[in-house]
Amino acid sequence: MDDWQQLEDWASSATIHDPQPTPGEICRRSQLFDYSRSEASAAIQQFRADLNRPQLTNEQWALIEADQEAEGFDKDRMNIGYNFPLRGPLALGAAESLPFSYIFKLGESFQDIRQIKEAVDISAQLFTGYGEYGPADVARVSGAGKRAIEKFLHSQASPFLWSTFIRLSLAPKDLSATSKYSTIGIDSSLPQRRARNPCENFARAQSEYPGWYFFHGTLTEPTNLQNQLHLDETPVLVPASIYGGRLRGWKHKYKGLVDASPTSQVKGWAFKVQSSEQEETLRIRETKAYKVVRCCIIFKDMAEILGLTFRFANPHMLDTD
């Protein structure tokens, strides 16, 4: 961590709200971290009084903002969560078996993947992330790897040696091979949506690549998509539309695609995703606030192709029409 970043963290820590927690904050911490009310209150006050505590940067928060806001967390609450020691089953190692992976920025505690391997003997995946200060090297580890790194850093007893872990949250993808589940605008539980014989197949398949995706919103901006997928050339987006969905507002700043009548049209753009790696990058970007579903993509020349899109997963959280 450089000196300027340290000063920014201290300034951010010093400008936090009233150190005395509210009853609602105490209740949330008690439920999340298995604390008594008095322990939760003391821990929050101790956290807010520590100017050296790790803080989520704006670029780290940007990676998880939509997902965490969907679950009721703001940046301050997430900062508190990352600094609370866990108790109960998670503290006993259950987190190692959870199907989560975590990312952290290299350059804070480790300069490269080799240093991680030498320190804790775990495997880590390296990729480039893009934040408000430009590209940055990011390491991805499993839940077990996260715990091993945390244990190692704790053993070093240095207040300037730490890493802020961000749990990756992928948009779920669960495409049935025996029914039209999940398809935008279709109740796939109905009998007519299921396979009529063992040889009947439903496209797109779960692991079928390359394949077309339908986008709306910021993913339709070529430069944004190029940065998200780290493409060398500007991606080709094709004007297209789908039926069976509509766009609704979320927190007055996002647009979520939800199910609608078969005649409801949404206009946007189509892009051919080339690999599972590209798709995973998009699923990480969308987070579990969305779900991958099937759709019929219609191009301007009226050609049709079965593709995929991201449907909003929590319609009850959308703005009132």
Image (cartoon, grey):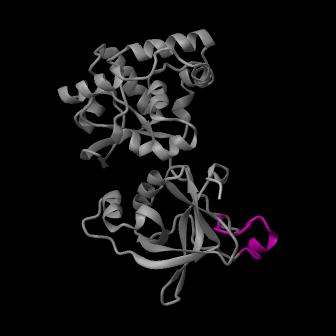
Which residue in the rendered view is the most extreme toward the right?
Answer: 191
The spot of residue 71 in percent (x, y) is 58, 40
Q: Is residue 45 above or below residue 15?
A: above
The spot of residue 35 in percent (x, y) is 60, 15
Q: Left or right of 218: which side holds 137?
A: left
**Helix, strand or loop for the magenta stretch, by majority:** loop
- Quarter of the image for residue 185 reads bottom right
Taking depth in this image into account, of 249 and 86 the one nearest to the observer is 249
The spot of residue 113 in percent (x, y) is 27, 38
The spot of residue 20 in percent (x, y) is 50, 14
Q: Residue drawn 73% across and 66% down?
A: 188
Tell me if I can see residue 242 in this picture.
Answer: yes
Q: Residue drawn 33% across and 71% down?
A: 235
Taking depth in this image into account, of 236 and 73 the one nearest to the observer is 73
Q: Is residue 49 above or below residue 225?
A: above
Magenta span contains residue 156: no
Q: Quadrant of the C terminus?
A: bottom right
Q: Is residue 313 above or below residue 102?
A: below
- Magenta highlight range: 182-198
Tell me if I can see residue 2 in this picture.
Answer: no
Magenta span contains residue 196: yes
The total number of labels drawn is 0
